[in-house]
Image: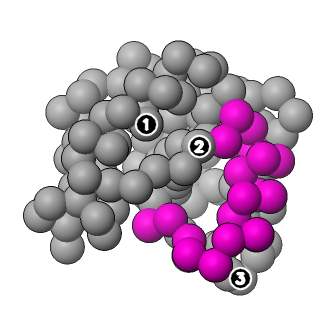
Amino acid sequence: MVVEDDHDIRETLREIIEGQGCRVRCAANGREALDLLTSETTLPSLLLVDLMMPVMDGRSFRRAQLEDPRLATIPVVIVTAFRDSLGDVDDLEPLTMLRKPIQLKELVRVIRAHCTDAPDAS
């Protein structure tokens, strides 16, 4: 699942992930993502979450996710354009972090390692 408020970035990430053979759902903010996650029976194998979003930002989303036992085990990749944000996210327990602009090679590596639909997925 891609949780990103910027429409163009969200759609680009969707295309890249689908290009790796994965199904992908998208949400424009953390609240929308939580609503989708709590209403669906099949959970995603990975969440790409932007930190800075309206309505519910990535930090608030991740805290809410960690409080829900059903959602807490889904790995999260934090995505941010802000260098200052990189040092203070350890409390969010991210799998990893990607800085915008995202390097395609790094994104594909993360997708292949964690998305169960992706070729060569573990």
Separation of residues labelled 1 and 3 (CA atoms): 26 Å
* Residue topped by disc 2: 26
Judge whether residue 38 is colored magenta.
yes
Question: Which residue position is annotated with label 1?
Answer: 14
Does the CB distance between marks 1 and 3 fall below 8 Å? no
Question: What is the crowding at mark 3: few (fewer than 14 residues within 10 Å), some, or many (at least 20)?
Answer: few
> For residue 54, what is the image quadrant?
top right
| Residue found 15% across the figure and 60% down from its top | 119
Mark 1, Cα crowd under 10 Å, few <14 / some 14-19 / many 20+, is some
Q: Position of residue 27 (x, y in %)?
A: 66, 42
Residues in magenta, as a range: 27-45
Question: What's the amino acid at mark 3?
Answer: Pro
- Look at the image and name its color scheme: one colour
Examine the rendered structure and indicate whether residue 55 appears above or below residue 70: above
Q: Nearer the viewer, residue 56 or 21?
A: 21
Residue 107 percent location from the top left of the image: 29, 38
The three-letter code of the residue at mark 1 reads: Arg
Residue at the far bottom in the pictured view: 69
Q: Which mark is residue 69?
A: 3
Residue at the image position 71 percent from the left and 82 percent from the top: 69
Is there a contact, CB below 8 Å, between mark 1 and mark 2?
yes
- How many numbered callouts? 3
Of the residues under marks 1 and 2, which one precedes in the sequence?
1
Above or below 16: residue 77: below
Image coords of residue 46 (percent x, y): 45, 59
Considering only order in the chain, which callout, 3 or 2, is on the residue closer to the N terminus? 2
Q: Quadrant of residue 58?
A: top right
* 81 on left or right of 27: left
Above or below, comparing residue 81 to residue 33 in the picture:
above
Q: Which mark is residue 35?
A: none
